[in-house]
Image (cartoon, rainbow, N blue to C red):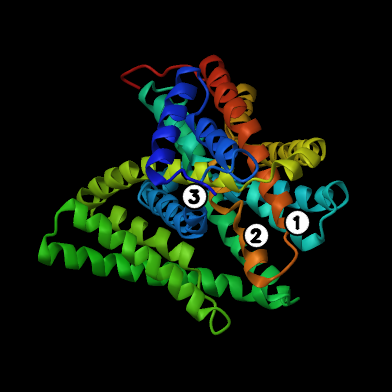
Amino acid sequence: MGWLGFAELVILGLLADGLFRRLGVPGLIGMLLVGVALGSSGLGAIDPRLLALSGDLRQMALIVILLRVGFALNLTTLRQVGGRVLLLAWIPASCEGLMITAVAQPLLALSWLEAALLGSVVAAVSPAVVVPLMLRLIEERRGTAKAIPSMVMAAASLDDIAVIVVNGLLLGLLVQQQSDLPGRLLGLPLGLALGAAAGALLGWGLIRWIERFRPNANRQVLIVLALALLLLRLQERLNGLVPFTGLVAAIALGVVILEWRQDLAHPIAAKLASIWVFAELVLFVLVGAQLNLAVAWRSGLAGLAVLALGLLARSIGTLACLHDSPLSAGERLFVVVAYTPKATVQAAIGAMPLMAMQAAGLPSGAGEVILAVAVLSIVTTAPAGAWLSAWVADRVLKPEPADA
């Protein structure tokens, strides 16, 4: 019987985060390893009642991720970096997802739908690793003449949106045990459009409400979080009746507030960043706690091969998007490297297939494999990608003159 509760996990997670940061490794790796050590495959010390809440806590963390993307997705910046961002948002992730779908079937003994689910989990880029480096490069004015850091940040945000939406589509197919993929694909554009419209309308209404009643920043954040959760619940209620993507609606909510009232958006974004410190800790510790080490061990070499082939396909897709760009060879290499770390999205949605299979009474072996490979992608690519991106940036991105 586990005895560790919420307070103990927070303390241990913070200690691991600080220790790994001092060692030059992303702190999220320390949080993840704390969960692995204390979870069911380790000491079994975590209270089962806390693990039973992991699904709700993970959904809250996903909401915070989506809102932070929305409140950072500046349409003016998107217009400045041009349409190449849209290519970088779709093509590399699609190449990686399709490659993983193809190779995971023989290497990990998954069905095509399970392999596609794995591809949709792994294909996202981690904003937790990418964004801090891009902000540092902007402050140092490295690559800013060609808007390289802004382009990578914007593309990574859109990449996450695309991957999360596709993951939700595939997860619905798995749980419902239906082969209505053509119908769902045809309904996807309508669902995206309805979600974006609902989020934009809600954002506009929220601006008017804030202007009238003048709540403080804390209350503004609470109402934004509550509305985003309601949008996800609305997606579940409308499932099967009309296509509606609540994930996109949550992002559109933030985009509209940022576009129309930056004086309101920036304080909310700062509060969400503070909330993310807590949400990130809970997310990575609980994901580690759910990992089955025996499955991870069996999937080790095959999982690494799947990840390596997926990253190769992603890199080829990224280079294809940059084929006729004004970037030099070194700058293109930087974009390729910066576009590889995995962490946040994998932790948020990596265990969803396993939980969905368990809730539907389906065999959960494939879900455990998906979670194991998702965790493996975090442990291998987050530290290596963060270090390699910084190393390449310092060598190929030259500082711009202050008066440029």
User: Looking at this rendering, what residue extends furthest in the left direction?
Assistant: 213
Residue at 62 percent of width and 26 percent of height = 384
Q: Amino acid at mark 1?
A: Ala
Residue 5 location (% of width, % of height): 42, 46
Q: Amino acid at mark 3?
A: Asp
Please name the amino acid that badge 2 sits on: Pro
Position of 302 compared to 249: left or right? right
- Residue drawn 14% across the image and 54% down it: 216
- Comes first in the chain, label 2 or label 3: 3
Q: Is 402 drawn above or below residue 11 in the view shown? A: above
Q: Which residue appears at 50% of the width and 19% of the height?
A: 24
35 to the left or right of 223: right
Q: How many marks?
A: 3
Question: Of marks 3 and 1, which one's residue comes earlier in the chain?
Answer: 3
Q: Name the residue: 42% across, 56% down.
A: 60
Tell me the CA gap for discs 1 and 2.
Answer: 8 Å
Q: Is residue 229 above or below residue 76?
A: below
Badge 3 element: loop
Marks 2, 3: nearer the viewer: 3
**Which residue in the structure is indicated by mark 2?**
353
Q: Which-is-in-front pick, marks 3 and 1?
A: 3
Callouts 3 and 1 close, C-beta under 8 Å: no
Q: Disc 1 marks which residue?
A: 366
Please tell me whether residue 339 is drawn above or below residue 142 in the rendered image: below
Residue 138 in the figure: left or right of residue 102: left
C-alpha separation, residue under disc 3 versus residue under disc 1: 25 Å
For the C terminus, the quadrant is top left
Secondary-structure class at tag 1: helix
Residue 67 in view here: yes
Labelled disc at residue 47: 3
- Outermost residue, right side: 106
Label 2 to label 3: alpha-carbon separation: 22 Å
